Image (tube, grey):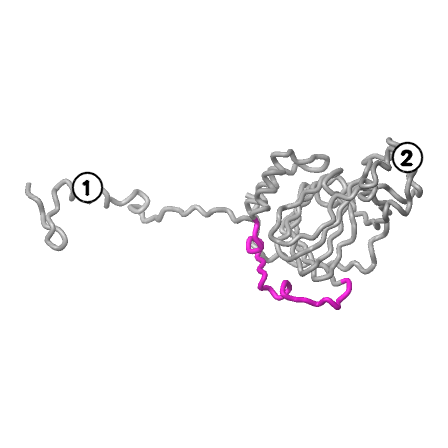
Amino acid sequence: MGAEVGVAGVAVPPEAKRRRVVAAKPTAAAAGGKRPRRVRRPTAVQRLFQACRAVFQGPGTVPKPSEVDLLRAILDRMRPEDVGLSSDMAFFRARDVAQRNPAITHTTIYKSEKFSMVILFLPQNAVIPLHNHPGMTVFSKLLLGSMHIKSYDWVDPDPAESGESSPDDRLRLAELVVDDDFTAPCDTSVLYPTAGGNMHRFRAITPCAILDILGPPYSIEEDRDCTYYTDFPYSEHPVTSTELIGSEQECRRLAWLKEVDMPRDLKMCSVRYGGPQVFER
């Protein structure tokens, strides 16, 4: 059998023709009139949700170091667009330095008994007062803006057993963990029940958006209500115990915290989440 003539008069050997015909055979799906299903990759916020669901095991548990690394790696890669935000939005372009105590807005992406995914929106000059996270592990990712964070941990997590001395029963000794400015994009911060700056204060330098993962979330019924504090320099109420005093440099990192009522000028409101949804599948 001789060669046949193809396009533009080029001779096509019989072997090539057979190979071409074989390659053109329809697939089983095409023969049945069905197109191959396209597999969609999960969104960034869906991947974060799935990781949180695998990591957080409920009250009384703390994620393992490897699990913390997993969530931190996912959050470090999160962008504002992953939760439906953009620096071009009017909120992030606003600059109203004259306004005092502006309202803080929050939106919930997901919440269960084991963890919650929340976004906080802080206008310029807004402050979330010093507060705690009892029995909680919290991941905070600054998505947009600049803010100042000041955080503390208790010098002694269990003062009743240690006999920690205090000049006033209402005061409790804490150690400074963080006191610095942060600008997005930056690394994810993590706090634990007794470490990492469990009591912190946020102050917005510019309009900010913070993605918070709380495991487990606040719950009055389960004795995880939010407590607010005010801080005083250690030097205002020094103690004589040499075990607590330490070096002069260590003293500068100490402060007394006093429990206070929720500030009356703290205004917070909730809005509906409008970004990519998460699915419990």
- Looking at the rendering, the stretch of residues picked out in magenta corresponds to 78-101
**Quadrant location, the C terminus:** top right
Label 1 vs 2, first from the N-terminus: 1
Query: Which disc is residue 19 wearing?
Result: 1
Q: Is residue 262 left or right of residue 169?
A: left
Q: Is residue 34 above or below residue 67?
A: below
Point 77% across, 60% down: residue:
267
x, y percentage for residue 219? 75, 45
**Disc 1 residue type?**
Arg
x, y percentage for residue 169? 92, 42
Q: Is residue 106 left or right of residue 41?
A: right
Q: Is any atom of residue 184 visible in this view?
A: yes
Q: Is any atom of residue 113 visible in this view?
A: no
**Disc 2 residue type?**
Ser
Q: Is residue 30 above or below residue 147?
A: above
Query: Which disc is residue 82 wearing?
Result: none
Query: Which disc is residue 241 wearing?
Result: 2
x, y percentage for residue 263? 83, 56
Callout 2: SS? loop
**Quadrant location, the N terminus:** top left
Hey, which quadrant is residue 162 in on the image?
top right
Q: Main secondary structure of the magenta part?
A: loop
Hey, which quadrant is residue 191 in on the image?
top right
